[in-house]
Image (cartoon, grey):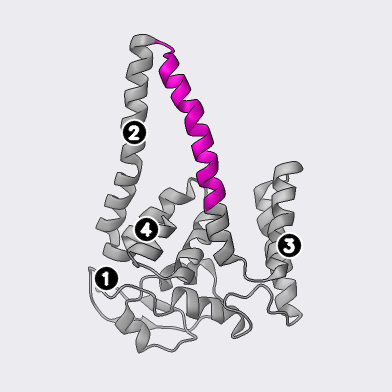
Amino acid sequence: MHRIIVDEKKWVGEKRFLHALSYCMLLPGPEAHQLAIYIGWLMHRWPGAVVAGGLFVLPGIISIMALSVIYAAYGSVPVITALFLGLKAAVLAIVLHAVQRVGSRALKSRPMLVLAALAFIGIFFFNVPFPLIVMGAGIIGFIAAQAGSTAFQVGGSHGGAHAATDEGLLGADLPEHAQPLLGGRYAYRPCGSPSGFCLSLSLAIPRAARMSSPRSACSFPKWPS
């Protein structure tokens, strides 16, 4: 998804993709499916979200139905069993490649690498619950920010909390044709911190509206009545 969406199609920029991926990982359910729905919504609003979400699961539905028919008709088929054994190795290689690809872009400092390694050790070897991992990382980042450290800021040492908002979610990496279908005027209201609610709403801002708005403000679309 990263290779196609960011590198080949250039539908969104690097930081916007990573922000959306991080947000989807915090939500229950498969983050890849949620990310596909978000990209569809970003490009074509709700019709795009419905189409992207539906087509994302369609190949899996067809595959499972076909395998169910084969199993119901013939039972355990050695060829199918051998096929899945081969797929296990392929999936492992794909996952490792994805970890390396996205990790090399998201982890920009040594403290980030150390924190990621500690999170992996905790969740893989010690079965630490995932919510505790996330809360612990958030607390560490908050303490580091309060101490004046820029080790966990997106884009380096400029801008603090709003740097992540400006460069990642309000930056100039939204496609030109990603315009709201409903139209109407937009109202702008600054917010004190980039909360999840504020960030999720700010994703709806088209390029023209964002270019005329304050760079440090989260933008709330005012839909027509």
Q: Quadrant of the C terminus?
A: bottom left
Whole-angstrom CA distance, mark 3 to mark 2, is: 39 Å
Q: Earlier in the sequence, mark 1 or mark 2?
A: 2
- In this orientation, which residue lies closer to the viewer: 190 or 166? 166
Residue annotated with mark 1: 180
Q: What kind of residue is marked 3?
A: Val
Residue 140, how many percent across, how many down? Answer: 73, 67
Q: Can I make out residue 192 in this image? A: no
Q: Name the residue at 58% across, 60% down.
A: 103
Q: What kind of residue is marked 2?
A: Ile
Residue 97, how many percent across, how many down? Answer: 53, 51
Q: Main secondary structure of the magenta part?
A: helix
Pointers 3 and 2 in contact (C-beta within 8 Å): no
Of the residues tagged 4 and 2, which is closer to the observer? 4
- In this orientation, which residue lies closer to the viewer: 107 or 200? 107
Residue bounds of the magenta highlight:
75-97
What crowding class fits label 2: few (fewer than 14 Cα within 10 Å), some (14-19), or many (20 or more)? few
Whole-angstrom CA distance, mark 1 to mark 4, is: 23 Å
Q: Name the residue at 35% across, 89% down.
A: 212
Of the residues tagged 1 and 3, which is closer to the observer? 3
Q: Can I make out residue 172 in this image? A: yes
Pointers 4 and 2 in contact (C-beta within 8 Å): no
Q: Name the residue at 68% across, 66% down.
A: 112
Whole-angstrom CA distance, mark 3 to mark 4, is: 29 Å
Quarter of the view holding residue 114: bottom right
Q: Earlier in the sequence, mark 1 or mark 4?
A: 4
Whole-angstrom CA distance, mark 1 to mark 2, is: 31 Å
Numbered tag placed on residue 61 in the rendering:
2
Numbered tag placed on residue 4 in the rendering:
4
Whole-angstrom CA distance, mark 4 to mark 2, is: 22 Å
Of the residues tagged 3 and 2, which is closer to the observer? 3
Residue annotated with mark 3: 114
